[in-house]
Image (spheres, rainbow, N blue to C red):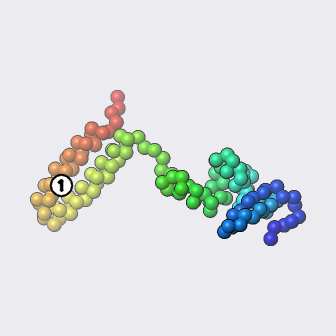
Amino acid sequence: MFCKQNPAKVHLTQIVGDKMQKVDLCEECARQKGVKCPNCGFTQADFKKAGRLGCSQCYQTFAEGLEGLLKSMHKGTKHVGKVPQALRQSRELSERLKNLQKKLDRAVSSEDFEQAASLRDEIKETKDQIEHTAPHRP
């Protein structure tokens, strides 16, 4: 399956079931098999040694193996970054305010004025909380 024409420069050890297999590939075969990044030449072995990838294209080249690894290391496979606590609270309160407003609109259209009054009060409290958590600008 491998070319057996060029000298092997990429050496892999694979575990299949309970057996260990060694695979030696030339650079071209390694690229074709998705073992070596076509952009930067980084290999899976390089990743294991360094603990980081060589370039942004490595994420696509090594996607199959990375997904399971990332799931075991992190909460998920999508990077969401960090948000300052005050901003996160402000966003949560804004989302809550939108939901309360939708509920209020439904209560008014169904003429449930008791529910509408309760929601109006909750909206006022939420707006007050938003004012207190919003970053103060000079």
Is 100 drawn above or below residue 85 in the view shown?
Answer: below
Is 55 situated left or right of 72 in this image? right
Q: Position of residue 105 (x, y in %)?
A: 21, 60
Q: Residue at x 33, y 49 (%)?
A: 92
Q: Is residue 78 visible?
A: no
Front residue of 20 and 68: 20
- Residue type at mark 1 is Leu
Mark 1 Cα-neighbour bin, 10 Å: few <14, some 14–19, many ≥20: some
The residue indicated by pointer 1 is 119
Name, please, the residue furthest toward the front: 18
Residue at the (63%, 55%) spot, across then down: 59
x and y percentages locating residue 37 in the rendered image: 71, 55
Q: Is residue 70 left or right of residue 115?
A: right
Q: Which quadrant of the structure image shows residue 114?
A: bottom left
Relative side of 90 to 44, left or right = left
Which quadrant, please, contains the C terminus?
top left
User: Could you say which is closer to the camera, residue 83 or residue 19?
Assistant: 19
Residue 106 seen in the figure:
yes
Task: Tell me the quadrant of the picture where the N terminus can be found.
Answer: bottom right
Q: Secondary structure at mark 1?
A: helix
112 above or below 126? below
In which image quadrant can residue 104 be found?
A: bottom left
Q: Residue at x 24, y 47 (%)?
A: 126
**Residue with the most extreme left position:** 114
Picture coordinates of residue 24, whole percent (x, y): 80, 61
Where residue 35 appears, as percent x and y from the top left, is: 72, 59
- Residue drawn where x is 77% and y is 62% of the image: 22
Q: How many marks?
A: 1
In the rendered image, the residue lying farthest to the top is 138
